[in-house]
Structures are given as C-alpha cells and as structure tokens.
Image (cartoon, rainbow, N blue to C red):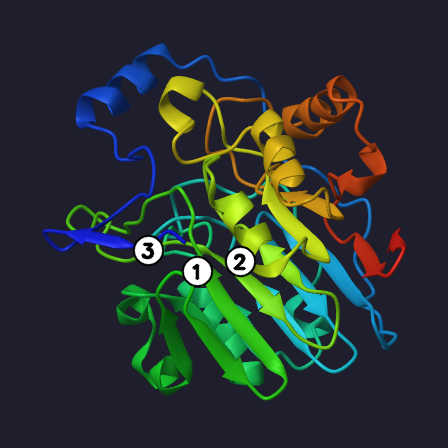
Amino acid sequence: MTSSRVEHGRYRNPGQSASKSFRDVLRWQMTAKRLPWPSHVPLERTARLPARVEAGTLAATFVNHATFVLQSPSTTVLTDPMWSDRASPVSFAGPKRVHAPGVTLDAIPPVRLVLLSHNHYDHFDRATLAALDARHQPTIVTLRGNERYIDRAMRPRVHALDWWQSMDTGDLRVTATPAQHFSGRGLFDRDRALWGGFVLEWDGPTVFFAADTGYWSHFREVREQFGPPGLALLPIGAYEPRWFMAPAHMNPSDAVRAHLDLGAPPSIGMHFGTFRLTDEGWDEPPRALAAALSAGTLDASRFRAPHPGQTFIVGPQRFLE
C-alpha cells in the first residue's frame, strides 16, 4: 500500500505532483474560458433527515460541495462540513455559494464524528467547525498536520492520521486513505499538512469518502484492502482546464474509472455546483457524468449526481432516494 512521503517538510503525492508554479497559475488566468454560472440557484428541497435508520442500512444526505450527513442506525457522521457563504479566508471575497446548504445546521441530529480531508477553505471551514463544536462537541478525524489549524479548544478531540492508519471509537473505525491532491491555506504552508480520503466502518454499510483527488491507483488499493465499499462518495467537479487541474481533481470520466476500480459500488457524486472554483459550467458535471456512464454502457442508477438536500438509503440490494 502507498505510504505518505515527506521531503523537506512537505508532503508529496503518490503519483503526479499537483503543485503548480506561479507561471502556470498566470497562464490559466490569462487563457481561462469560463463557462457561465448563475449567481443564485433556489433549492429544489430542504432535507428532512430520517428520524430512524433501519439495521443494515445507512442514510446519506447531500448538503453541498463535499458535505454529507451520514446516518447509521446509531451514529451520525459529517464529511468536510461547509455551511459558510464563502470558501475563503475572508467573509467579503472569494468563491461564494450559489445555493443554500441543503440541510440546516439546526436540523442535524447529534454528530458523533467529523471527517476533515484536508485544509483547503472549501473543505475545512473554521466557522462551521466552531458552530458544530458548540452544538455537538464531536470527535474530529483528519490527516497529519491539519490539527494545527483547528481551534485549541477542540484539539483534545482531534485525531490526525497518516494514510492507512486507523482510529477506533466504540463500534466505529475510520481509516485514512491516500489521495492525489495538495494542501495549503496561505502563502507559506503549501503541502505542510497531509490530504486524503477515509473509509468508515460502522453499523451500516462501509463508506469510502474520496475527498478531493485526481485519478490514481489508490482506488484499486482501497478495494484490495476493504473490498467494494457499500457506498462511495466521489468528486466529479472543479476539473477544467485539464492541463492544470488533472493532477488534483477528477473529471466525471475519471470518476467513472474510480467507480469501476472500486467494484462499481453505489456511488454519489460531489464537489460540484456550489462554489465556482474552475472553468467548467455550473451544470456540466452531472451532464458529463451521465455521458461517461452511457459511453461505458454502465448502470447510471449506480452512480448518481445528487441535488442539495437529497437523501439516499443504502443497504443490501438497495440504493434508493
């Protein structure tokens, strides 16, 4: 299995480097062909989370971006919780959400665990973490180096893992997995904290949360280690232009390859349609996902692009809204 690497105090990807030079960034900005995004999108629904989850199943509710509420019969877990208006270090600038979260913070049942995949602002939002801490005091599981960005009051409940390292709490086990990405919240901390995904084993079907990642062989490693997951949460957005984004972000075709590498489990797309981060159009990722599944003559009902607030029930022989 792939281990994390540190060189001169900076973590490195298992495959292609995702770090870009200032010249690359300038080239992208000067040649960008950004397709349209709306300034505001009304929600199709606001979620009513299940009051009860049947034995042997889980409920996965898409909030927005990479945030899901995962409910087993006994536990609630959040992935990369993001309820702020902007994915930014400041409240007056930076990518602004185009739709409200599909679940309100007040509607979430007691949260036992929060998974934090890396420290980018669209995944690691300190204001949201503070709000969750005030309500639930959850345990936080992240990757090495990210604990330094978490408020001191929460740190006694933070577990920072390396790739393939596990943390147990009661009947729940979390294992950190590799990802092809990068980290940084400022000018001087590039790649000084690790990034990754998670496998969640509990009293419902196993969940693989891939987080931000380019396509690489780690999806096959996850399957070899754990078998096909009961549910895979896979990114399908923030991918254009490919010459710039491919090492760090999958496009829908890459996500379909990952879906197959994992054994074609029930899969839900994420990381699209909330914050404008790259050049593809607002509605392009779901359309491109449908096209990629069709081109491979794959069962489109096994890989869904959700609406904010949409809940899926996953269990043996079940993948239902």
Q: Residue at x 79, y 59 (%)?
A: 47
Tell me the element at label 3.
Answer: loop
Tell me the element at label 2.
Answer: loop
Q: CA distance from mark 2 to mark 1?
A: 6 Å
Q: Earlier in the sequence, mark 2 or mark 1?
A: 2
Q: Please, what is the three-letter code of the amino acid marked with disc 1?
A: Asp
Q: Which residue is mark 1?
A: 125
Image marks 2 and 1: residues in contact by CB distance under 8 Å: yes
Say the numbered circle drawn on residue 82.
2
Residue 245 drawn at (x, y percent) = 41, 27
Quadrant location of residue 99?
top right
Q: CA distance from mark 2 to mark 3?
A: 29 Å
Residue 294 drawn at (x, y percent) = 78, 21
Say the numbered circle drawn on residue 3.
3
Instruction: Classify residue 153 as left or right of residue 268.
Output: left
Q: Is any part of residue 233 visible from this angle?
A: yes
Q: Residue at x 84, y 38 (%)?
A: 301
Above or below residue 50? Residue 273 is above
**Which quadrant is the N terminus positioned in?**
bottom left
Tell me the element at label 1.
Answer: loop
